Image: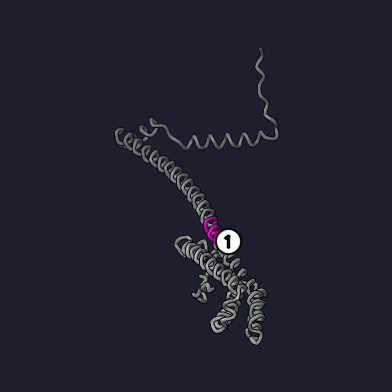
Amino acid sequence: MINQEIRIPSDIAPEVLELASRYYAEQEKSYSDSELVEAATEAGIPARFIEQAIKDIRAQHQHKIEQHRQAIKHRQMLLKISAVLLVAIALWNVWTYNSLSGAALKTEAAWAQVENQLQRRTDLIPNLVSVTQTYAQHEKELISLLVQSREAYLQAVTSSEKATAMVQVNQAIGRFRNLVSTNPQLQSSQLFVNLQYELAGTENRLAVERMRYNRSVQNYNQKIQGFPNSLIAKALGFEKQSFFRATTSHVPQITK
């Protein structure tokens, strides 16, 4: 079998020759161990010194190469550690956000239960008006106050507006209780007795839901104010919630 000679295209031949010339020039600039020993002998340097010098220089170069390798490994390790830290921080951010969101949702749910009882309490006002009109028609100012307080609550939208409206409702109910205390006929009516039961039950349920809401607010506020959660809470817009303070501690007594 006849070996065919590999042909080099003419368009790359100049590049091949140029690169070969460069390799040859670099080879000419290097020396073998024997050449260095021979040159040192001619200069009057004993061979053992040049051999030791060659050994030391090679060791230094090898040490530099090893240092370079270690530096590369160190950088790679730092990159891995940085990646792990970034992933850990990202996971912690997600977990913290979910935790704060969960606490906020519990607070909203607890407030919804408070609002249910506030609404139930407000819905009893028409019954108070009816009783007042039946047994104390001359109390027109009280009747007007009851009606206006209920309308104020029904028109309230935000939590602060509802809290303000509840002050009016409490004042109106307080005025009604004062009327009851001075009106024996009203106290003895079965309609009022039934209404008192409903008022007492609503007040008690409201107290329970208010307590639950305040507990959820306390837990939520502790979460967003504690470090390092406070960093995430502030950045994501989680704000401190206010406790629901009772405007009156009086629970109506059942009278017969």
Front one among 142 and 187? 187
Q: Main secondary structure of the magenta part?
A: helix
* Residue at left offset 61%, top offset 34%: 17
Q: Is residue 212 left or right of residue 165?
A: left
Q: Position of residue 161 (x, y in %)?
A: 61, 75
Where is residue 94 drawn, in percent x and y?
54, 54
Q: x and y percent of residue 18 in the render? A: 60, 37
Mark 1 — residue?
109
Q: Quadrant of residue 174?
A: bottom right
Q: Nearer the viewer, residue 123 or 98?
A: 123
Note whether 47 is above or below 104 in the view shown: above
Q: Where the N terminus falls, by quadrant?
A: top right
Q: Quadrant of residue 117?
A: bottom right
> Is residue 171 in sight in this rendering?
no
Q: Please provide the residue range marked out in magenta.
A: 98-106
Three-letter residue code for mark 1: Ala
